[in-house]
Amino acid sequence: MNQQSVFYKVARAAVACLLCLCIWIGVASAASEGGVLLSAEDLRTLEPAYDAFLQKLADVIVERGLLAPEDREDWLLYQMGDYYQNGGYGMIAAMFTPNLLDEARPQDAMLRLEKEMNIGTLHISTMRAYSPLDSAQPGLLLEASVTDNQGMPVACRLRWHCEQGGFAVWDALGGKVTEVGNFCVNDGRPTYWSDQPVSGAEPGALWRIGLDLLDPYDDAKVLGSAELVLKPEGSGWVLDENSLR
């Protein structure tokens, strides 16, 4: 038995174990919430273990020549995006497939953005595309944090706001996603934005999601501001590396 065959068997076994865990949680979630996909809370709970697995798997498939080293980060973003987009039931691509990432749908890949602010570096994790007609998520994922020049967390509160659409957050007490309107303030937990499906948007039209960084003890004190610019496409919106401004 050659090394590649051994690798495939190990990879399949690892994926099977992870999927069994996802399915078990999904069954429990379905029984309690009447759904068939993992909840937002389930996905957040599993993410550290899933990310650690993907990091190790990326090392192996790069070493075996199944993935170019320069494509490693894009592969990780695609796999994590697929995980969120499909409610934990996505596919792990650990095989030699030329131009695989070129064929990936934007809505199945994550996007990590950064912007230098007076108080540090703002980091936002989101998706490259979102459509309410083609997503297992309650909206466009928005997860933000700020770090200093040493990479340490900077304490602040986050105020998301928009003129079009609205936000939703995971209500751990109620065990469900709750809509909160066109603004919300929190300490960094994941937030979701959504709007009605786009239909016939005017050329050049843009949707904007604002973010204010607030003093951790005084919401009236704004430490910095930024915005995400979304471009309508199809029934939803797309983002790119220049979307955080």
Image: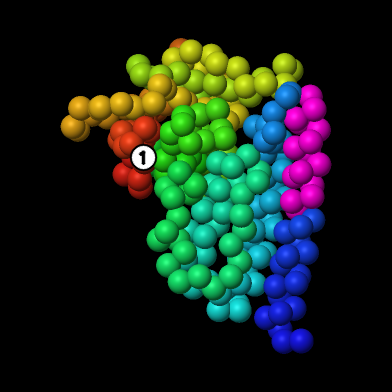
Q: How many marks?
A: 1
Is residue 159 shown in magenta? no
Split into 4 quadrants, where in the image is the N terminus? bottom right
Residue 164 versus residue 96 in the image, above or below: above
Q: Is residue 69 above or below residue 90?
A: below
Estimate the x, y position of residue 4 in percent, counting from the top left: 68, 81
Residue located at (18% from left, 32% from top): 203
Choose top left, top right, bottom left or bottom right for residue 40. Answer: top right
In x, y percent, where is residue 222? 42, 20
Question: Which residue is labeled 1 in the image?
Answer: 238
Residue 144: horizontal and vertical position, in percent? Answer: 51, 35
Chain part drawn in magenta: 18-32
Q: Quadrant of the C terminus?
A: top left
Q: Amino acid at mark 1?
A: Val
What secondary structure predominates along the stretch shown in magenta?
Answer: helix
Q: Is residue 23 visible?
A: yes
Residue 45 or residue 152, whichever sits in front: 45
Find numbered disc 1 in the image and state the secondary structure of the residue it sits on.
Answer: strand
